[in-house]
Image: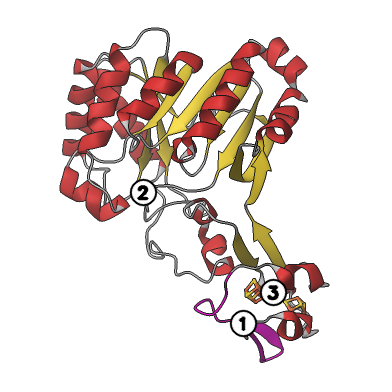
Amino acid sequence: MTALKANIFSIQRFSIQDGPGIRTTVFFKGCPLKCKWCSNPESQNQYTELFFREQKCQACGSCVEVCRENAVSLNNEKAAINRSLCNNCMECVDVCCSGALETTGQLMDLETVFEEVMRDSLFYQNSNGGVTLSGGEPLSQPEFALELLKRCKQKSLDTTVDTCGFVSWETFEKVLPYTDRILFDLKHLDSSDHLEGTAVKNEIILENLRKILKTDNTQLWIRIPVIFGYNDSTDHFIRITDHLKRLRIEKVSLLAYHQWGAPKYGYLGKDYPLQQTESPSQDKMESLKEIMEEGGLSVTIGY
Ligand code: SF4
Ligand code: SF4
């Protein structure tokens, strides 16, 4: 029988921002959304990709020699990758002496991921922490996510799933019995604006949100990325507050947009879509928090 595998791009131990207590966060590759502000562009495609950090390149030429697709050349004392020819075979990574070439994402089997998660089980117990599945969209690799959650529950670990919500209801129905908490990202209430910012409409997401709230035993925390000039208007926040209030949401986190992920677009040979967009000021974040609190919601800035 073939072992169940998923493409994982990071396993972060001692995470304190993805649910309560000390946690291990497993980052899955692959996401149905393409948010313009995404700070993990390496999470969007489900396959292993090539990272190239040009500043580290020492122009040794080994990658040019090894590449069977003629996808690399040396220009101005640095390697240059033609992404349209590259097939992500990763042979150049093995010969790169400087660490300029790296893979992002690897196929991992369930046993290996679970063993990694169990390394910190003592810390989870002492801090009321546990395990978070994030990404990308963890439920875009649903079988693996489900089995990992089941294994965690067999060991009585606290489980959290961080989701964009654009997932089939059948998948949610399967994972919810093994999930203590859902971190549900909400980006925009208007479907056309949602499409513009994320490349998908929001009807499925809002419908899933309503359905999850009807299930027992799974907490739901809302997370809203605040993007300057996109979703941060007073009017929009008044409407989101009304919407969440009607749904009896318990907790909302406002996450200020930042550009920390911008260099990674370059490592993947992509343009960064929000080059000119600033982070919202602390005053702006406080004013949006106030709007939501006046509407009766419990709100934090940050996690
Ligand atoms: S990943 Fe493979 S195809 Fe792409 S540049 Fe490296 S060796 Fe060439
Ligand atoms: S193998 Fe690495 S250091 Fe050498 S030219 Fe290629 S990217 Fe640069």
Q: Which residue is mark 2?
A: 33
Residue 6 among those drawn in magenta: no
Tell me if 39 is positioned left or right of 251 in this view.
right
Quarter holding the N terminus is top right
Question: How far apart, in angstroms, are the residues tagged by discs 1 and 3?
Answer: 23 Å
Residue 217 percent location from the top left of the image: 42, 8
Residue 176 appears at what percent x and percent y? 43, 18
Q: Is residue 80 magenta?
A: yes
- The amino acid marked with disc number 3 is Gln
Q: Going from the N terminus, do you reach mark 1 or mark 2 first?
A: 2
Over which residues does the magenta segment extend?
71-87
Q: Position of residue 84 (x, y in %)?
A: 49, 78
- Residue 101, by quadrant, is bottom right
Q: How is the image coloured?
A: secondary structure
Q: Which residue is mark 1?
A: 69
Identify the disc placed on residue 55: 3
Measure how far apart labels 3 and 2 are at the Cα level. 30 Å
